Image (tube, rainbow, N blue to C red):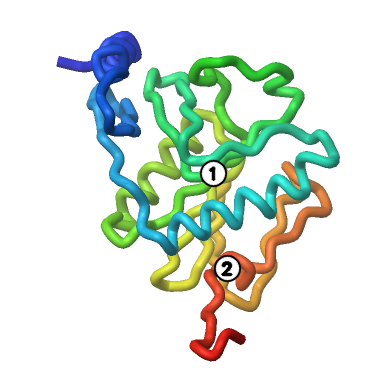
Amino acid sequence: MSLTIDHLKNLQSQLKNDSNDYQIELREGNLIVMGPSDIVSSYIGAQLSRLLGNWVTPRRLGLVFDSSGGFILPNADLTAPDVSYVSRSRMPRTVRYFSEVVPDLVVEIKSQSDRITKLREKIQMFLEQGVKVGILIDPDELTVTLYRPNQTPIVFIDSETLTLPELLPGWELQISDLWPPVFEENGD
């Protein structure tokens, strides 16, 4: 049986009094319960959200969302990228529900339990649904891979700078700024 958004709503209403906090996605008619991210992936997501937000918010370019923001895609999937961005022209007003707008940018961050192949497939699905730019961050390899529809992915390494001129003209991301700092034991 293929499940729908209505099935998910029903499940959420049944779980609302449960003391656990579940993050559930609906992909290809299947419910997927998402586990918490590892601490490095969480840091990277928070760091990228902050760096994007610091550029987007004062310029009133749009909205940046974290991994809790759910999007209902044209294929009827409900998914929550680790980080996403929607331009203000495409989302002039936020709603107190899942968005039925396809994000302009989605970011997936590999957790220690994730398989990179599945994340690549998820980015490709986003692109097929109308996302303009997908980014896959792999903390194990210290790489950031940029995906655009019908183009070869571009891999960025630690010393490089990522730009997204079609979405965020002037914004730059130093790849090395994503990784957690290593603190010395003496407090430095």
Label 1: few (<14), some or many (≥20) within 10 Å?
Answer: many
Residue 114 placement: quadrant = bottom left
Quote the CA–CA distance across marks 1 and 2: 18 Å
Image quarter in which the C terminus is found: bottom right
Q: Is residue 172 left or right of residue 120?
A: right
Query: For mark 1, what is the residue?
Result: 83
Identify residue type, mark 2: Phe
Identify residue type, mark 1: Val
Position of residue 40 measured from the top left corner of the image (x, y, whole percent): 43, 63
Query: For mark 2, what is the residue?
Result: 156
Which is nearer the eye, 143 or 33?
Answer: 33
Which is nearer the eye, 117 or 49?
Answer: 49
Image quarter in which the N terminus is found: top left
Position of residue 11 measured from the top left corner of the image (x, y, whole percent): 25, 16
Q: Judging from the image, what secondary structure is the residue with disc 1 in?
A: strand
Label 1 or label 2, whichever comes before in sequence order: 1
